[in-house]
Amino acid sequence: MALLTFDTAHKPRQSYASMAVLLAVMLVFPFVAAQFGNSWVRIIDMALLYIMLALGLNIVVGFAGLLDLGYIAFFAVGAYLTGLLASPQFAALLESVVNYHPELQDAIVRTFGEDVRTNGIHLSVWFIVPLAGLVAALFGALLGAPTLKLRGDYLAIVTLGFGEIIRIFMNNLNDPINVTNGPQGINLIDPIRIFGVSLAGEAGSRATVYIGGFGMPSVNAYYFLFLLLCIVTIFMTSRLQHSRLGRAWVAIREDEIAAKAMGINTRNVKLLAFSMGASFGGVAGAMFAAFQGFVSPESFALTESIAVLAMVVLGGIGHIPGVVMGGVLLAALPEVLRHVVEPAQQALFGKVLIEAEVLRQLLYGLAMVFIMLNRPAGLWPSPVKEDRPAAAIAKEEKEENEA
Amino acid sequence: METFVQQILNGLVLGSMYALVALGYTMVYGVLNLINFAHGDVLMIGAMVGLSILKLLDGAFPGLPGGVQLAIAIAGAIPVTMIVNVLIERIAYRRLRNAPRLAPLITAIGVSILLQTFAMMIWGRSPLPFPQLLSSDPVNIGGAVISHTQVLLLVLAAAAMVGLVVLVEKTRMGRAMRAVAENPRVAGLMGVDSNRVIVATFAIGAALAAVAGVMWGANYASIQFAMGTVPGMKAFSAAVLGGIGNIYGAMIGGIVLGIIESLGAGYIGDLTGGFLGSHYQDIFAFIVLILVLTVRPSGIMGERVADRA
């Protein structure tokens, strides 16, 4: 990792150079990958979304040391909000509400026009994305509020429960009032439209996006959007890390009582960690919904929360470049395995012995156990010792004493 | 009134399963101050091994009475889960015993994923039907009905709990366990081998989970690799409700949670005017958990403080 340095404080020239190199590679990447088929770019699009999620979770787990096992719930909130506000689903909701509150229906129809009854609401991306972030942040605070007194194990299990509660609601809120359409999920979600350009391509363009005279596949267009969002996320979280608030998070992570004694308002600071982390999850969720055009409860199971946590742990808790690397590794690798390992097994044994899905789980489990046992600071730990979690420092000290 | 009796009865059945699993959580927490996140998956392994034994029996000795088959399945599942749980302790927890809290917690989650993955490899991903071994005629108790399997479950759970209480209160090993739970260092100075005690704790917890797992399968007639997660979380909630670290608390917490859950599922429709239905059964455990942790973190029986974690 010596080649790429992102330690702007100590080695500014090297780190800006590596950033420039990385950016150049990232910009060219989709055009090269597209040569091998759009599915590869699609994989990277999803990986970028996972990186956003991992960076959001890193705020909660990495900076503030609050183990959140229900993080995917915020992703779900963003995705479902988009599903509701940018698809025909709203018409179904309106129809099921009509028997209970006719006056409410009248008000909605008056605001959004008669079209709402049949076509639902189709709000603009400029409205939905901030709203998704905001609502997810609200949910984050909602989760944070009752768990403020808790730490470690208890917090982990309560957040896990919270994630399950959200999933149970997504699965069942189709009757009597149809909000989420139940297990079938919400279909026909609008693609993202920026300044009149639809990122899914116009009808009849065979998923090709034309900007001026220049055309590229839809997945590439999404790639650039997600890349931009990832860069914004990285910028924001790294600024947060070195802000007063970020320092307060670290203080709470290392010793909550001492932090309190130094005058940090632990309650507000913890709530901020939850809601800021959650807001990134919400925005990623909105992107996911628009990208897929479809959301269902299946995408937001507990295993997804654990997958995101595994990314943070594998890369390096609290170290942003490490978390990004963890996200790339764990989001893209299983998909690559699917394309490589299953055909290889087919060729060798004539059948698939270990499915890619199983292999993916195996990878997550092994990553978490081995990293915690052998490299608690992750594969790419922070170069600054004080940014590493206590677990890593304890191990380093133990090894120094033994040596 | 009839629904009420029926729901209480259902709650008792459900609760005794939670109690068996909660005991495993609480005992490990007592000696290590660690939540064994993989404990729910140990239950799943128990159920899976039980099913495999039943299939073997069916091939080798067809026509064996259902009760005997079930007994053999449970007896066979217990040693397997014991070995699994002891291995988990050895590989994932022992080296991290003095590490900061986050580390063993994350390995525990990793182990839980790994157990599910191995189960997927061995038994596949789709739900497996669990055979109906006992008579399907309902037993009538005061207007409410309960199956033979559920009666057996209640009897087994009661027996297991009595056995555990005797073990903890009357035997040398039980005394050593209490000593380690109280203060591991002082217990060590008094000549207690804490590693042995911890291994024994994991083994006993696994045995109880195996009983619960096989009976879970027999009761719900279908098992799957991911089946352990939700009962695991609920059993943990039960342990917290009773007062984590306290074995009587785990039993009481399990029963109380089971009853809350089945009453909740039975009456939620009426309470919310039909807005929420009985498929919301699963949320009660978490609501109870959050309420207990915020209002009385030491639970019904415990004197420990939640801040300990």
Image (cartoon, rainbow, N blue to C red):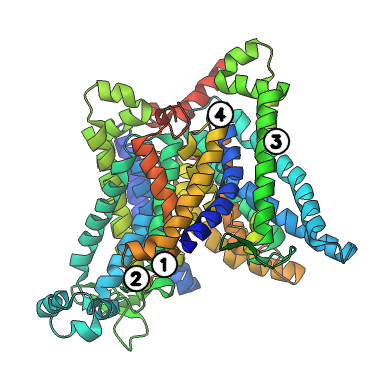
Q: Residue at x 18, y 73 (%)?
A: A195
- Asked where in the image residue B281 lies, by quadrant, the reply is bottom left
Q: Residue furthest front?
A: B142
Q: Is residue B188 left or right of residue A263?
A: right
Q: Is residue B230 left or right of residue A107?
A: right
What's the chain of the residue with tag 2?
Answer: A
What's the chain of the residue with tag 1?
Answer: A
Q: Which residue is mark 1?
A: A171
Describe the element under mark 2 as helix, strand or loop: loop
* Above or below: residue B44 compared with residue A11: below
Q: Quick one: B148 or A133, which is closer to the camera? A: B148
Whether residue A116 is visible: yes
Q: Are marks 3 and 1 in contact (CB under 8 Å)?
A: no
Look at label 4 and name its amino acid: Gly
Describe the element under mark 4 as helix, strand or loop: helix
Q: Quick one: A315 or B169, which is closer to the camera? A: B169
Residue mark closest to the camera, 4 vs 3: 3
**What crowding class fits label 1: few (fewer than 14 Cα within 10 Å), some (14-19), or many (20 or more)?**
many
The x, y position of residue A181, in whole percent, is 36, 74
Q: Which residue is mark 2?
A: A180
Question: Which label was assigned to residue B30?
Answer: 4
**What crowding class fits label 4: few (fewer than 14 Cα within 10 Å), some (14-19), or many (20 or more)?**
many
Describe the element under mark 3 as helix, strand or loop: helix
Q: Is residue B62 left or right of residue B6?
A: right
Q: Which residue is mark 3?
A: B163
Q: Quick one: B66 or B83, which is closer to the camera? A: B66
What's the chain of the residue with tag 4?
Answer: B
